[in-house]
Amino acid sequence: MSRRLSIIITDAEQCRMRNVIPWGFISRIMRILLLQTLDLVEKHGDIVLGALLSGKLTAFDLIKKEVSDNGAIGFEGDNIKS
């Protein structure tokens, strides 16, 4: 059985989301972000929640860590390069 998750976002955030994430991908992206966040909290504890809520940890930080561990892709400034 599937469950739904509702979050409150502003009109501007909704417009930005629709302009940036292709139609049909939003639900999948949000599910992946939720699952990855749950994995991090289970692995590292509540400190992850505090870091996310304070802005000390961002999705971009997590991508950089994954990329540096993988070694297949690198970063140049704020741009991903292959």
Image (tube, rainbow, N blue to C red):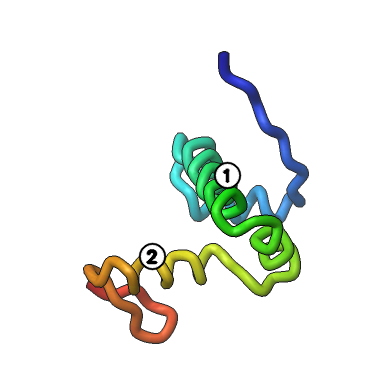
Q: Residue 75, image x and y in percent?
A: 34, 79
Q: Amino acid at mark 1?
A: Leu
Q: Which residue is mark 1?
A: 34
Q: Residue 66, image x and y in percent?
A: 38, 65
- Looking at the picture, tell me which residue is in the foreground, 7 or 46: 46
Q: How many marks?
A: 2
Q: Is residue 45 left or right of residue 71?
A: right
Q: Which residue is mark 2?
A: 66
Q: Are marks 2 and 1 in contact (CB under 8 Å)?
A: no
Q: Residue 4, image x and y in percent?
A: 65, 26
User: In the displayed structure, would residue 73 be above or below residue 33?
Assistant: below
Q: Which mark is residue 12?
A: none
The quarter of the picture where the C terminus appears is bottom left
Element carrying mark 2? helix
- Looking at the picture, tell me which residue is in the foreground, 65 or 27: 65
The residue shown at (48%, 49%) is: 21
The residue shown at (59%, 48%) is: 42
The quarter of the picture where the N terminus appears is top right
Local crowd at mark 1 within 10 Å, few (<14), some, or many (≥20)? few
- Looking at the picture, tell me which residue is in the foreground, 1 or 48: 48
- Looking at the picture, tell me which residue is in the foreground, 10 or 56: 56
Locate residue 63: give its quadrant. bottom left
The residue shown at (60%, 55%) is: 16
Element carrying mark 1? helix
User: In the displayed structure, would residue 59 be above or below residue 32?
Assistant: below
User: In the displayed structure, would residue 34 be above or below residue 16?
Assistant: above
Mark 2 → mark 1, Cα distance in angstroms: 17 Å
